[in-house]
Image (tube, rainbow, N blue to C red):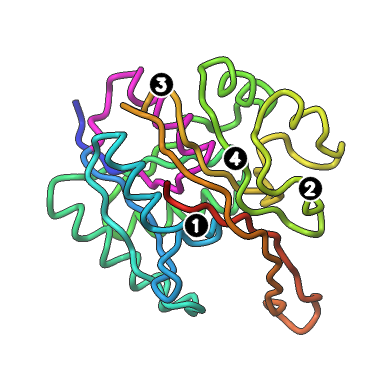
Amino acid sequence: MIPAFFNWSGGKDSSLALWKIQQEGKFSIQSLLTSINAHHSRISMHGVRRSLLEQQAQALQIPLHTIELPEHPSMDEYATIMHNGVDMLKNKGMHHAIFGDIFLEDLRAYREKQLATQSVEAVFPLWKIDTKLLMQEFLDAGFKAITVCVSEKKLGPEFCGRIIDQAFCEALPSDVDICGENGEYHSFVFDGPIFKQPIPFQLGELVHRSYPAPDDTSEAYGFYFQDLLAD
């Protein structure tokens, strides 16, 4: 099998993509690669604690490598830190990077462009598959996940800290992608066919955070975060 590293967020799409890769049998996943907000010691964007990420890696039985990012990195800082992290894995013989992206063309183009400078090939096992079909496959396979971050522009706090099941899917507004591919929500997967054992946790505090707009023409935006405590 071809050695590769997996860009792991800890969420639903990552889990389903990893499951598909393992079923296919073409790639051997040698490492998980996860971006961490080093200031808060949490998964970038998702806000999940490092301790729960480490438990996921243990349950997956795949070595974890983290990219330690400052709280508000510039694009240049981000690119440099990511480049160095990929270089380390490439030097260990991994020339393929697996992603859980589904249909965001600009994000895929960015990943491919950055990795091409390092002669690393990006692989997208979920690409262009209908998100409703992906969600059904995720649930049918026995994965269990909870929402840990929702965009206030698309969803209210009642959707944060909620188990992802059929009722959750049916309650989503019509303009929200069922897999949250447009950033409507992020999740933490705590059980499923790729894990050797479930990840125990308890619900912590539900918090709201606002972030400055990326440019002067946009409004500030906010997210609700459900903190999860390692059990």
* Residue in view at x 19 percent, y 52 percent: 90
Q: Residues within 10 Å of mark 4 (few under 14, many from 20)?
A: many
Q: Which mark is residue 110?
A: 1
Front residue of 184/101: it is: 184
**Marks 1 & 4, CB-CB < 8 Å contact:** no
| Nearest to N terminus: mark 1 or mark 2 | 1
Mark 1 to mark 2: distance in Å? Answer: 33 Å
Q: CA distance from mark 3 to mark 2?
A: 28 Å
Q: Which residue is mark 2?
A: 158
| Residue 193 numbered mark, or none | 3
Q: Is residue 93 left or right of residue 180?
A: left
Label 1–label 2 contact, CB within 8 A: no
Does 65 appear in magenta? no
Q: CA distance from mark 1 to mark 4?
A: 28 Å
Q: Residue at x 53, y 52 (%)?
A: 228
- Apparent side of residue 227 relative to residue 92 in the rendered image (left or right): right
Q: Which residue carries the number 4 mark?
A: 146
